[in-house]
Image: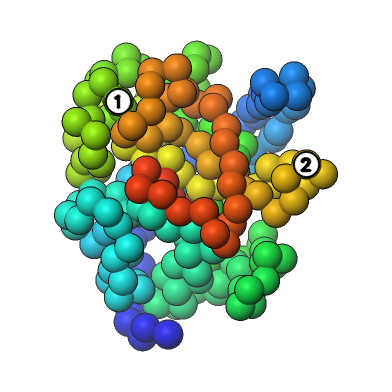
Amino acid sequence: MIERIFDISTLNDQMVEIPRGEIELRDDRIKEEWSVEIGPFFLSKFPVTQDLYFEVSNENPSSFIEGRRPVETVTWKDAVIFCNRLSIQSGLNTCYVVREEDEEIAFDNKSNGFRLPTEAEWEYACKAGTMGIRYGELDKIAWYKSNSENTTHCVGQKEPNDWGLFDMLGNVWEWCSDLYDTEVYGSYRVFKGGGFCDVERSVMATTRRRSHPLKFKIDDLGFRIAKNK
């Protein structure tokens, strides 16, 4: 384990308080809708950058190397291990119990440490009180196929949503904590938001994709961190 001590007040400056509310989710694949109540929580203003990932893990797996770009080419397990390390280095309790080669990673939803957002939290925070599929004009808020030049970009260059969150759409997809559909896909986890190489119709708050938590990693998939209030 990398032993470092983080200034938790500096980290807290990057966390946005998300108010309680409710979100209607939809899965077009199975044509189902459901409602989820959201308690207040904190979500990072930006996706985890390569600088922060390296500071915590002493690694940078990214394909497009630059410190302020989002980290990518990380599995879901890589993301939760990062959350645990960041929690320890910040003097907080870890949210996950991780065993090698174990797809049944246990989660403590009462912990005060860092974690991935749930899918409902992610979509609720992305919409930021708006009702549409996006929180603004796509070219102004997101890096996607038409404007990205086929690469990631440094975080925070596009307009934020109404709650001050940047790059919620485009740049990189973001892992969420949820299982997708255990009956059909087993341990597959959800990711949201669209990436730099996606066409316009894929870059929406409502789009949901999934893949294997231990094996799948690609150059347009990263994550951002959440924390209980």
Which is more toward the observer, 47 or 45? 47
Rendered residue at 59%/42% (across/down):
210
Res 49 quadrant in image: bottom left
Side of 130 relative to 66 (left or right)? right
Q: Secondary structure at mark 1?
A: loop
Rendered residue at 45%/74% (across/down):
85
Q: Which residue is mark 1?
A: 145
Against 148, is 109 above or below? below
Q: Secondary structure at mark 2?
A: helix
For the residue marked with disc 1, what is the amino acid? Lys
Q: CA distance from mark 1 to mark 2?
A: 30 Å
- Crowd tier of the residue under label 1, counting other residues whose Cα lies within 10 Å: few below 14, some 14–19, many 20 or above: some
Q: Which residue is mark 2?
A: 184
Rendered residue at 72%/45% (across/down):
185
Against 150, is 8 above or below? below
Q: How many marks?
A: 2
Res 159 quadrant in image: top left
> Which of the marked residues, 1 or 2, is nearer the chain's N terminus?
1
User: Which label sits on residue 98?
Assistant: none
Observer able to see residue 20: no
Side of 75 relative to 135 (left or right)? right
For the residue marked with disc 2, what is the amino acid? Val
Side of 43 relative to 13 (left or right)? right
Residue 89 lies, in percent from the top left, at: 40, 77
Observer able to see residue 12: yes
Residue 52 lies, in percent from the top left, at: 29, 63
Which is more toward the observer, 227 or 176? 176
- Crowd tier of the residue under label 2, counting other residues whose Cα lies within 10 Å: few below 14, some 14–19, many 20 or above: few
Quarter placement of the N terminus = bottom left
Residue 44 lies, in percent from the top left, at: 39, 49
Q: What colour scheme governs how the chains and residues are painted in the rendered image of this protein?
A: rainbow
